[in-house]
Image (tube, rainbow, N blue to C red):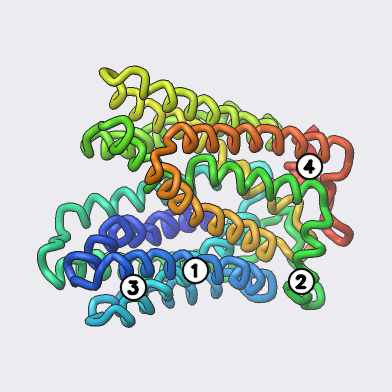
Amino acid sequence: MRAKLLVLASSIGMLGWGAVLPFQYAYAADTRGWGAFAAAAASSLFSIGALVAAPVAGRLSDRFDPVLVAVLSQLLGALGVGALVFADSPAAFLAGMFVFGLGLTAAVPAKQVLVLRWVDSADRRRIFAYKFTGEALGMAAGAYVAGHLVDLRAPQGLDVGFLTAAAGFAISSLVIGLAGRGAGVHPGSDIVTEVSAPKSPRESLRLIFANPALRWTAVVTVTLALGFYAQFESGLPAYGLTVLDIDTAAIGTAAAVNAIVIVALQVIVVRLTAHRSAPTLLMAVGAIWVLSWLVLSSAQFAPGVASAMFVTTFGIFAVGETMYSPVLNPLTASLAPAGMVGQTLGIFGALQTTFSALGPLVAGALLGAGFANGFLGLHLAISLIAVYAAWRLRGAMRSGEGQPTSGARSGTDEAVLAA
């Protein structure tokens, strides 16, 4: 029951992402008249807040009750995004977006640690899959509601989005707080809960990346993020509009198809892959990314069906997504040093955020300069690197290099499956 409540809370907590982020650029730049620089800076500060929050919150989740960390993080996010209702200057808006990013992202490693504590090893992939699907639905619901209620012609037109985000955070915090009352560690969990002596950030990084398998997992994390997630909201739509000359309706349809495929296939894929090793599945995700970029590359040679191929590409990407999050997070946790699960997840989350934030810059530079084929070739190469990194990860774990670092637990489900 606790895990189901956590999935529900995660879904509600993502309402704000969908209700605010798709509209904030136009709101800041045009509606409020603060200009493109302020709007871009708001997006950047949101990402910087996320980057700062992830490793810090992960560290706090190891040392303190992760329920408390998740609740306080989301309440902080609620204050930040709720305060945007009263933001009448660029500085106030930028500060609110920064705190919004802090609160939203700080709760992520805490909730991941709660899954690991409340769910036994055999069910983790399934719960992570439900959590991922619930978050996608929450984002979609937030965007749908805001899309019908937001009025970007009025200065208060995005207030409904800000208030929806704040309410989502508050309700999510309440649900997590109720689920965590009297909770301990599930008897079937293999997560070490004893907290070792506090280590400096540098010592933590050294200990985490002393493990060859974690190093290759980091490469997989970065390349798979760059290979799709970094371009989902900007690069891919820009390519479709400027190179394939498709209309905006096709962009919306592609995003909808992506979400529908995830919802339709998530549970089925988890069942079919339950006994497959994590590195092998991550190789499959990389291969799916490669196929997607090949299909997208061929669309420019068939203008008559370019829109259909663009939408199809988003559906293919979605198949890989059904394996990505349910597999990667439990694998990373299983390889983490003892007492450092939250820190490890937070650091890997920060890596993903950092490189995802670079995606729009890369896309803008290449597509703006007319290097569409360079844009496609770069991401095809990145996806191939992801396949190679996952293959090396599988080799490291089979050779015994993937065992958790000195002092960590052993015999986790992912280590066993890796063979």
How far from the left and from the top, in percent, is residue 253? 27, 35
Inspect the image, locate mark 4, and give the three-letter code of the amino acid beneath it.
Ala
Q: Secondary structure at mark 3?
A: helix
The one nearer the camera, 306 or 70, is: 306
Circle nearer the N terminus (2, 3): 3
The residue carrying mark 2 is 202
* Image quadrant where one finds the C terminus: top right
Residue at 19% in and 65% down: 30
Q: Which amino acid does the dot numbered 1 rest on? A: Ile
Local packing at callout 3 (Cα closer than 10 Å; few below 14, some 14-19, many 20+) is: many
Image height check: is 17 above or below 403?
below
Tag count:
4
Q: Which residue is mark 3?
A: 81
Report the Cα–Cα distance between label 1 and label 4. 33 Å
First-in-chain label (1 vs 4): 1
Q: Is residue 281 above or below residue 113?
A: above
Q: Using the rendered view, name the quadrant where residue 195 is placed.
A: bottom right
Residue 181 appearing in the image: no
Camera-nearest label, 1 or 4: 1
- The residue sitting at 32% across, 82% down in the picture is 92
- Residue under the point 26% across and 32% down: 245
Q: Type of residue at label 3? A: Val
Q: CA distance from mark 1 to mark 3?
A: 15 Å
Q: Residue furthest front?
A: 369
Residue 397 seen by the camera: yes
- The percent coordinates of residue 112 (x first, y second) are 58, 58
Which residue is the site of mark 1? 48
Residue that numbered label 4 is attached to? 415
Query: Distance between the Cα atoms at labels 4 and 3?
Result: 41 Å
**Could you tell me which secondary element the residue under label 4 belongs to?**
helix
The local secondary structure at tag 1 comes to helix
